[in-house]
Image (tube, rainbow, N blue to C red):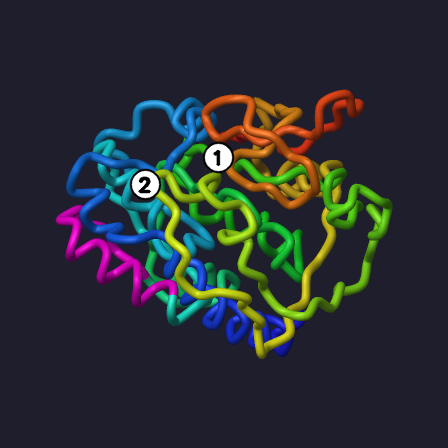
Amino acid sequence: MKKELHEANRLSWNAATVAHNSHKGDQAAFFRNGGSTLFPEETGLLGDVKGLAVLHLQCNAGQDSLSIARLGAQVTGVDISDEAIAFAKQLSTQSGIPARFERSDVYDYFRDAQARGERYDIVFCSYGTLCWLSDLSAWARGVSQMLKPGGRFVFIDFHPVAMVFDPSWKFHYDYFNDAPVPEEGVGDYVAQSGDGLVPDGYQTGVQDFKNPHPSFEFAWGVGQVTTALGQSGLIVEHLGEYPYANGWKPFEGMRDIGGRRMAAPEGMARIPLMYSLAARKP
């Protein structure tokens, strides 16, 4: 486990989170008026969560956590970013949607939560999460340990096949990459995607954001992810792939095909841009 890289990523996310939220306007009012940031794929995978204990790993600034809590779940959100968790706590208070948020490296959280005896009906994570994990096997074991018997792990993320391209759809990154990939820092993907990631109306906010803190990402293939979860004792019940990315427009010419689902340019051969997975603990 590369904790020094996790610390670099924490600083990078602290800076980026401020820029991201600057584009989203009055988020508390959005939630008070009944808003939700969940896409149909997430609500479908989660199912009826009323009365269930849900752990949202790498929850970012808490918008999806609060959207799940609004469905009747008791939600705990965990994220490494100080800025993200501070914002999530404030948003919970101002929106009137109760949830618990904890700032922690996910691996430290697994250790501490296990010592406290915490267990959940559902463990959830989504969109741009696995690329920050330096030890996939330890993560999978932690997910399994957090689940009650019969509990479910629900996951949706951008497809690693899509991660081999640069913004102009040219091959750039290895699909198979065992080393950390250094980046200039977490970028302002919210500004890049415009209305795609802001359901309540995009605002200009911070312009031309340049992150002063570098970041480090990790490449995990679909086979590695499913194998790690299976070896942790979970039974994979669903694995789905999608020719679009919810909300995110990382490449040139992406188009909204409805419901803020972003697809490749017209005429381009379709590839998987997103995938989902659901697994159960026996």
Numbered-mark total? 2
Which x, y percent locates residue 68?
31, 38
| Residue 154 marker | 1
Name the spot of residue 215 as percent of width and height, x first.
64, 69
- Residue 107 visible in the snapshot: yes
From the viewer's side, name the closer residue of 85 and 100: 85
Q: Secondary structure at mark 1?
A: strand
Q: Is residue 259 magenta?
A: no
Write down the region rendered in magenta.
84-101
Q: In what quadrant of the picture does the N terminus appear?
A: bottom right
- Please tell me whether mark 1 or mark 2 is closer to you in this view: 2
Residue drawn at (73%, 46%) of the image: 163
- Please state which amino acid type lies under the numbered disc 2: Asp
Residue placed at 42% from the left, 30% from the top?
39
Q: Which mark is residue 196?
A: none
Q: Is residue 276 visible?
A: no
- For badge 1, the amino acid type reads Val
Residue corresponding to mark 2: 200
